[in-house]
C-alpha cells in the first residue's frame, strides 16, 4: 500500500501561452511599444489587416489589438467577421484609432 506522500506526481505541462496579435495596415510604433511594455503575453504577433482573419481563426490569439483609421472599411469588416464567427467571437478585440498621417508634398 502506497502512502499519500509517496504517490507519483506529474509535472504540470499544460502551461497556457497567452498570445497578443496586433493587426493593422501598418501598425503604429507607439502601439507596438505599449503592448510590449505591458507584459503578460508570451507571444506578440503582427499581422496586416488583409490577411488577419484567417490567421486569427487558425491561431486563436488571447487578444487582438486592431489599429485603424476612422474610415478604415477593411478593419471594420474584419471586426464584423470576427464577432459573427463562433470560432472567433470570444476573442477580445481592442481598437486603437490612429490619426491620419498627413501627406508630404515635395513642392
Image (cartoon, helix red, strand yellow):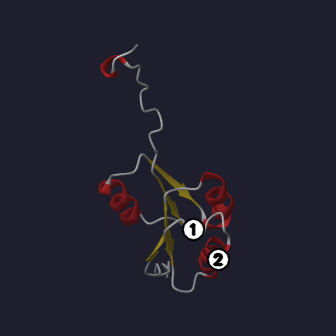
Residue 65 point in image, percent of width and height: 47, 66
Pointer 1 with pointer 2, Cβ within 8 A: yes
Instruction: Provide the residue designation for mark 2.
Output: 74
- Quarter assignment of residue 30: bottom left
Instruction: Provide the residue designation for mark 1.
Output: 25
In this view, the residue farthest toward the top is 1
In this view, the residue farthest toward the front is 1
Q: What numbered label is drawn on residue 56?
A: none
Q: Which residue occupies the foreground of this view, 25 or 45? A: 45
Residue 51 point in image, percent of width and height: 67, 61
Q: Residues within 10 Å of mark 1 (few under 14, many from 20)?
A: some
Q: Residues within 10 Å of mark 2 (few under 14, many from 20)?
A: some
Residue pictured at 44% horizontal, 66% vertical: 28
Q: Is residue 63 left or right of residue 76?
A: left
Q: Which residue occupies the foreground of this view, 2 or 34? A: 2
- Quarter assignment of residue 4: top left
Mark 1 falls on what kind of element? loop
Q: Which residue occupies the foreground of this view, 39 or 87? A: 87
Residue 85 point in image, percent of width and height: 68, 70
Residue pictured at 51% horizontal, 85% vertical: 70
Residue pictured at 38% horizontal, 15% vertical: 2
On the rendered image, what quadrant is the N terminus found in? Answer: top left
Mark 2 falls on what kind of element? helix
- Quarter assignment of residue 97: bottom left
Q: Is residue 76 left or right of residue 70?
A: right
Q: Which residue occupies the foreground of this view, 85 or 36? A: 85
Residue pictured at 44% horizontal, 40% vertical: 15
Amino acid at each position: 500500500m502506497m502512502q499519500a506522500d509517496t504517490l507519483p506526481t506529474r509535472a504540470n505541462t499544460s502551461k497556457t501561452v497567452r498570445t497578443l496579435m496586433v493587426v493593422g495596415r501598418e501598425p503604429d510604433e507607439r502601439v507596438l511599444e505599449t503592448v510590449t511594455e505591458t507584459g503578460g503575453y508570451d507571444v506578440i504577433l503582427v499581422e496586416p489587416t488583409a490577411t488577419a482573419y484567417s490567421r486569427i481563426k487558425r491561431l486563436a490569439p488571447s487578444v487582438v489589438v486592431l489599429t485603424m483609421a476612422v474610415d478604415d472599411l477593411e478593419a471594420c469588416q474584419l471586426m464584423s467577421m470576427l464577432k459573427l464567427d463562433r470560432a472567433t467571437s470570444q476573442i477580445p478585440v481592442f481598437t486603437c484609432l490612429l490619426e491620419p498621417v498627413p501627406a508630404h508634398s515635395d513642392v
